[in-house]
Amino acid sequence: MMHRAFLRFLIVAMSVCGALQAAEQGTAAPRVARPCPTWLQQSTLYQIWPRGFTPEGTLAAATKKLPHVAELGISIIYLSPIFLQDDDPRLEFWSDRQKASQLNNPRNPYRIKDYFKIDPEYGTDADLKAFVAEAHRLNMRVILDLVYLHCGPTAVAVTNGLDWVERDAHGVPVPASWHFPKLNFKSASLREHLFSNMTYWVHQFNVDGYRCDVAPGVPLDFWEESRRRLEKIRPDIIMLSEGERTADQCFAFDMNYNFTWLRTLQQVVEKGTSAATMQALWQKQRASFPAGARFIRYTENHDIVHDELRAEIVFGERGAAAMMVFCFTIDGVPMLYNGQEFGDCSPQSIYAQWPIRWESKPLKKAQKKWAFYKRLCQLRKEESALATGAVAWLTTDRPDDVLAYTREDSAATVMTLISLSNRKVSVMVDCDRMGERLLSDGAVLKLRDNKVHAELAPFGYSVTKTKK
């Protein structure tokens, strides 16, 4: 009876979400996110950018590095696009950043020619199968990067004579935002082609899901039907939306990117905006997204490092570390990028094979950072409150400088204090307990008069646990 009652609840919740999805770009707020398994809430993602992950830039070389990623404690590998790239040299079909890079490389991983083929730059079908098999052996899942908003100017979708791209009155393909031909989702045959593409990589290569590029640019009903079909062959499929459409998680997606969150956090750390804006943004997003919605939390990805350099260069080592403590202890699913775990600061470009510097990993400073990130990944799995616990914000006398909050479940309460200021801070927190230390740097805490009093160094932090 309890099981049937729960199913009825889910059906009603999904129906409500469906009615509210009429405002597809997020003007109406769905109320309930799709159920999320505990293993996904406990997960940490790691983005591999194949061109820069190894000196060879291949899947075979990346496979040899997977034990390193697994040792860190990663649960899900997000593998950036490996499909056949369009090498058309006409500059009118290049993105602005592609031209601005001055690398003169037409081969953009996000300008795809054939969704069913692996680009020879990265290897073969056998190489991808070996990569996925090794990841699974190491207890990690693999999601591929789908780029369905647009394609290359000589792509199959353009040259097959069908209505798979949008065209103007003269039959010329209509460009999407990056000057690439825009796919036509009014075409039933295009949809079937893409549905078969998604099931192909699951069936033939055993991948575990997808990160969907510019997902809000594609009709939501397409993603919903994709999920229905994929769940028939893999019930635990992972779907990540690169975007902030509020209706995504009602059915189609498990998680969303959160660009607004990252940009706001960057302003706090780099420009000195009040730390209280993070709490205000959290509350605003909680009100506008479905209850239980999940976001990936990160400070680097391929776009960020291409345009803005690595986080440690922009925010300093201590600032970058404090930001990542926030990403790992607030609700959501944290993500690391391509060498971030040992402080790699080598130049990165979407259009060049500039590898991360693996030779620096044995150095003392790199090993210290490795231990820091390994500990963060470990806490995500060991402390259930950090995966599923409710967030409660704490009152402090320094709201412009310090974030203070708890994550609480039936087992424990985890309290996090983080200074987002580049100067020393003395802060009083309205909390009558501290508990055992889980992670700390530049923080001295004392309990006095039923308040926590903390001395925090620039970008200092403290994570403590009180058992129940």
Image (cartoon, rainbow, N blue to C red):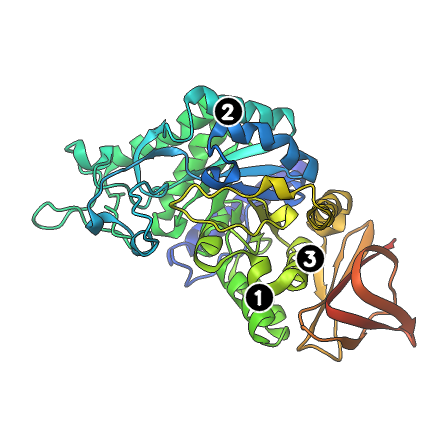
Q: Position of residue 55 (x, y in %)?
A: 50, 36
Badge 1 or badge 3: first in the primary sequence: 1
Q: Which mark is residue 256?
A: none
Marks 2 and 3 close (CB-CB < 8 Å): no
Q: Nearer the viewer, mark 2 or mark 1?
A: 1
Residue lying farthest to the left in this orientation: 170
Label 3 belongs to which residue? 325
- Can residue 342 be seen by looking at this rendering? yes
Residue lying farthest to the bottom in this orientation: 397
Disc 3 residue type (three-letter): Val
Disc 1 residue type (three-letter): Leu
Horizontal side of residue 192 vs 341, given as left or right: left
Horizontal side of residue 225 vs 274, given as left or right: left
Horizontal side of residue 421 vs 219, given as left or right: right
Q: Which mark is residue 206?
A: 2
Q: Residue at x 19, y 50 (%)?
A: 174
Q: Residue at x 67, y 53 (%)?
A: 328
Label 1 belongs to which residue? 265
In depth, the one of 240 and 377 nearer the eye is 377
- In the rendered view, tell whether residue 299 sits above or below residue 109: below
